[in-house]
Image: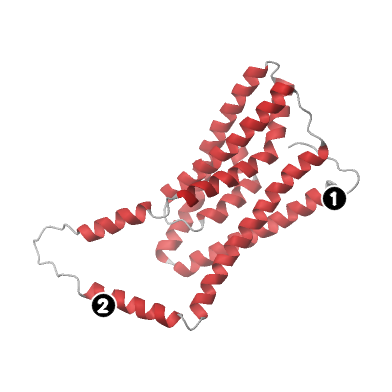
Amino acid sequence: MRHATDPDHVVAITTIVTKQRGVAKAGLIGALWGLGHTFTIFVVGTTIILFQITIPPRLGLSMELAVAAMLILLGVLNLTGSLRWLQDRLAPGRQSQGMADATDSGEAKTQPIRLPGTPVGDSATEKASREDLFRGVGLYNVLRPLIIGIVHGLAGSAAVALLMMATIRDSWWAVAYLLLFGAGTIAGMMLITAIIAMPFAFLFKNFAGWNRSAAVASGLLSLGFGLFLSYQIGFVDGLFTVHPHWMPR
């Protein structure tokens, strides 16, 4: 569960939950992210443990660079979405949006008036609430955190496997530990994602402008942190140099 609090994990998941309206959906996203992360940890870690594979420094750094590239991509996608919203709001087409809002307002005014004492059975409102609860839970929203988790698992899989090889001599017990480690990561990501989503869900319901500002901020944070990691891995750790040096962590 502590592993779930690593900065690259928190930054990546923040770029996703800024667009979520509910804490439950965010928790599901965290679970899917943890599941993808566990899949990579288990597959790569088991291969290293059972076959006693040694990871070359350049390959290890390349696996970590994939995480940095994913953070940069997430940041760019978040910023692109926010910039598109600004463009739509400032473009002449916003007038059509205003007409649509007026139409919605007119439809709202034509809703039947309930007399005092009549039973409250607003089926339309209840149906809308149910649709809103499950809106966005589709193939894309399932695959996105899974893929991000799989990529992020690359950075930690070698370190976890090497730790197991140094402390647990029996290979099958080490593999069992990987599964337990994965279960803790899934639980930790669910908890952290739900906690991160709480203020964003509040902002989404009450202050739409602040929610978009948070999306921009998370995009900038992800982009900046991804660029920092790329520099750290590429030049400080030497991936782009003749003599790379890699310390699994």
Tag shown at residue 169: none
Asked if residue 162 lies left or right of residue 149, the reply is right
Task: Work out whether 241 lies above or below 35.
Answer: below
Residue picked out by circle 2: 106
Kind of residue sitting beneath label 1: Phe
Total of numbered circles in the picture?
2
Residue drawn at point x = 79 percent, y = 51 percent = 232
**Residue at far top of view:** 170
Residue picked out by circle 1: 240
Asked if residue 128 lies left or right of residue 197, the reply is left
Q: Is residue 194 visible?
A: no
Q: Is residue 129 visible?
A: yes
User: Between disc 2 and disc 1, whose residue precedes?
Assistant: 2
Task: Work out whether 60 lies above or below 217.
Answer: above
Residue drawn at point x = 36 percent, y = 80 percent = 99
Residue drawn at point x = 79 percent, y = 48 percent = 233
Residue drawn at point x = 14 percent, y = 70 percent = 113
Give the percent coordinates (x, y) of residue 12.
60, 51
Colour basis:
secondary structure
Q: Nearer the viewer, residue 26 or 42?
A: 42
Give the percent coordinates (x, y) of residue 43.
63, 31
At mark 2, the secondary structure is helix
